[in-house]
Amino acid sequence: MNYIFKQIDTCSFCHSKEFKILGKRLNGAQGFYPERKIGITTTIVKCKHCDLIYSNPMPIPVNINDHYGVPPESYWNYDTFHVEENYMQGLITQMNSIQPIKLGSKVLDIGAGVGKSMVAFERAGYDVYGIEPSESFYDRAINHMKVSKEKLQMSMVENCEFEENSFDVILLTAVLEHVYEPAIVIEKIMQWLKPGGLVFIEVPSSNWLINKWINIMYKFRFRNYVGNLSPMHEPYHLYEFSEKSFEQHAIKHNYEIVRTDYYLCQTFLPKLLDPLVKWYMKKMNSGMELAIWLRKK
C-alpha cells in the first residue's frame, strides 16, 4: 500500500498550532510488544486547545480503494444486511425529541454503506438521499437493498454538490473519522442544510477510557506507542473527537450543539470487570463513541 504523508500545520477544527505528541502508531495491530514488530509508524498528536486527536503527518493512500474497496461481506455477515423493523427507531425518536421533523422532510445519509439507514428512514416516512464512496458498498445498496439509483450517489462527500438549504436532516455516522478534512466537510454540509436543520454525527471519542489505560501501559513499559487511531489499517481511523472540538468550530460556522451522548460500546476487558468499568465510563463521559446533534442557526 502506497501513501503520501502530509504534514499538518494547524488543527482542523480550531486552527491552533499547538499540540502534544502522544506517541507512535504502527500500520497494523500493535499488541503488547509493538517494538518487536516490523512496520511503518506515524506520530499521533492531540490539539492543546480543543482535544482533537489526529495523525501528523497524515498518511493519505495514493489509491483510496486500497482502504475501502473491499466487499461488504468482509465487514459483516450477509444476514446483517436485513433491515429489522425497529432499526434506527431510537435515533429517529431522539431526533424528533430535539425538534419534530415532519414526514416527507429531506434526509441525507453520508457514508450510506449498504443503505440500511436509508431504508429505515424511508420506512419512517422521510424522503431520503445518500452518498457512498465505496463501489462495493454502493453496489450492494442498489442491487440487494434496492435503494434507488436516483437517490444514492457513488462519490466521496468532498466531491458532491447539492443545492443550498435543501435538507432538513443530515446524518454522518462513522464517517468523519475517515475523511482527511473533517471540519471542511462540516462546513460544506452546513450549506446543504436548511436553517434550523439538524446534523447527527457519531465519531470515536478522544476521551475513551480504554485508550487512556492502553497508553499508560505503554508508558509504564517505556514504550513510545499509543493505542489511539488506526490511520494505516482497518478501520482506518484518522481522528478522535471531543465535544470541545465542535464547540470551537461552531463559534465561526453558524451552528450550535443541541445534544451530546457518549456510547459505552465494548471495553475489551474480562467480563468480570465490564460492569464496573462501564459504570465508571458512563459517570465520566469516557465511552468509546461521541454522538452529537448540531443545529444550523
Image (cartoon, grey):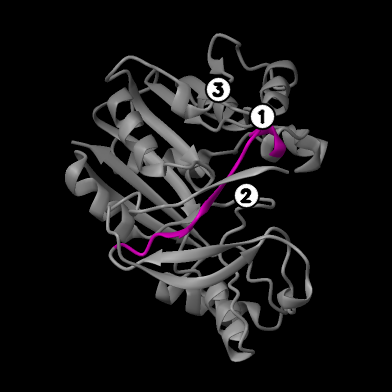
Look at the image and say whether residue 231 sits in the magenta stretch.
no
Task: Tell me the tag on residue 236.
Answer: 2
Three-letter residue code for mark 2: Tyr
Q: CA distance from mark 3 to mark 1?
A: 14 Å
Image marks 3 and 1: residues in contact by CB distance under 8 Å: no
Q: CA distance from mark 2 to mark 1?
A: 18 Å
Q: Is residue 215 above or below residue 262?
A: below
Mark 3 vs 1, N-terminal side: 1
Q: Is residue 162 above or below residue 80?
A: above
Residue holding disc 1: 114
Q: Position of residue 17 (x, y in %)?
A: 29, 60
Q: Secondary structure at mark 2?
A: loop
Q: How many C-alpha atoms fall within 10 Å of the one at disc 3: few (<14), some, or many (≥20)?
A: some
Residue holding disc 3: 155
Mark 2 vs 3, N-terminal side: 3
Three-letter residue code for mark 1: Val
Q: How many C-alpha atoms fall within 10 Å of the one at disc 2: few (<14), some, or many (≥20)?
A: some
Residue 211 position by quadrant: bottom right
Q: Position of residue 246 (x, y in %)?
A: 31, 52
Q: Secondary structure at mark 1?
A: loop
